[in-house]
Image (spheres, rainbow, N blue to C red):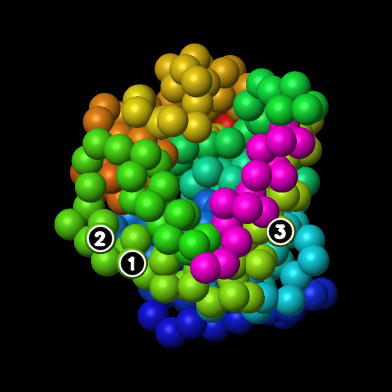
Amino acid sequence: MTSQTIERPEGRVAYSVDGRADAPLVVLVPGMGDLRGTWRDLAAALTAAGYRVAATDLRGHGDSDTTFSEHGDVATAGDVLALVEHLGGPAVLVGNSMGAGAAAWAAAERPDLVAGLVLTGPFLRDPTLSRAGRAIIRASYTALFARPWGARVWARYYGGALSKGRHATWHDEHVAAIRAAMSNPAHLRQFRLLCRQLTHAPVEARVGEVQAPALAFVGRLDPDFSDPVAEGVWIGEAIGAQVVMVDDVAHYPQHQAPDVVAPATLAFLEGLPRGESGAWVAGARA
């Protein structure tokens, strides 16, 4: 797949697309500090099943421009909706971590463009912290992800605690690609800016507006949730999602357990409403 870009007000967002132009569209959105290669296994399964699959990089990540001043769930949701309109929606949105939050916000904002949601390691609300606690964590990002150690620190955390449990055969290759990308000073600056700006409060405020059918995967070892099972229950109740708890997996079910995520996702897509032409019917739970 060749990297392409879509123009946004502050720069270009990169994406790649594969599959027949007339096939139902699925858009894959990575999380903070990740690359669109995180979807390698799921993208292959979706394309083989006959879907048109587009995978994005976040603002300031991967092949996207490093000129953005605004980052986070809402900004990412705007980019995703622009891509869906550009490629011809509606689409099923598949998001990981903050990419899941962006997908949910997009479904609330434009139900006419979103036929379904598949969420992995989903952040649909902020962790419970005091205002002071949040301020301390955000301030710490400036030191943790500064040069020259920032790329190394993030790659170690991504490849360690956030990926605890099972690993893809290409895990080390992917972590090395993340470290290489973050070694670019402009990418690292954009990452720090995202870390300081990121809040999922706008997503939580709109979860009640999400009408698209949803499937969520939560790793039982995910360190981003104090109680992954309880978070899975809340996600299921908040957006009416079918929730799959994934054993021996942390924050990245899409590449830690593709043998779980891919078949469940394909079964979910098969059950979504479609029109006579085979195109998705957006915004309606079955």
Q: Report x, y in % for residue 156.
A: 38, 52
Circle 2 Cα neighbour tier, 10 Å, few/some/many (<14 / 14–19 / ≥20): few
Q: What kind of residue is marked 2?
A: Asp
Q: What kind of residue is marked 3?
A: Leu
Q: Report x, y in % for residue 230.
A: 49, 15
Q: Nearer the viewer, residue 200 or 191?
A: 191
- Helix, strand or loop at label 2? It is helix
Are the residues tagged 1 and 3 within 8 Å (C-beta)? no
**Residue 209 vertical position relative to residue 56 in the rendered view, above or below:** above
Taking the spot 63% from the left edge, 75% from the top edge, the residue there is 186
132 relative position to 83: left or right: right
Q: CA distance from mark 2 to mark 1?
A: 6 Å
Q: Report x, y in % for residue 144.
A: 57, 51
Q: What kind of residue is marked 1?
A: Ala
| Picture quadrant of residue 251 | top left
Q: CA distance from mark 1 to mark 3?
A: 22 Å
Q: Report x, y in % for residue 38.
A: 39, 59
Q: CA distance from mark 3 to mark 2?
A: 26 Å
* 147 within the magenta span: yes
Mark 2, residue position: 172
Mark 1, residue position: 176
Upstream in the sequence, badge 1 or badge 3? 1
Taking the spot 34% from the left edge, 50% from the top edge, the residue there is 159
What range of the chain is rendered magenta? Answer: 134-148
**Residue 69 vertical position relative to residue 113 in the rendered view, above or below:** below
Are the residues tagged 2 and 1 within 8 Å (C-beta)? yes
Q: Main secondary structure of the magenta part?
A: helix
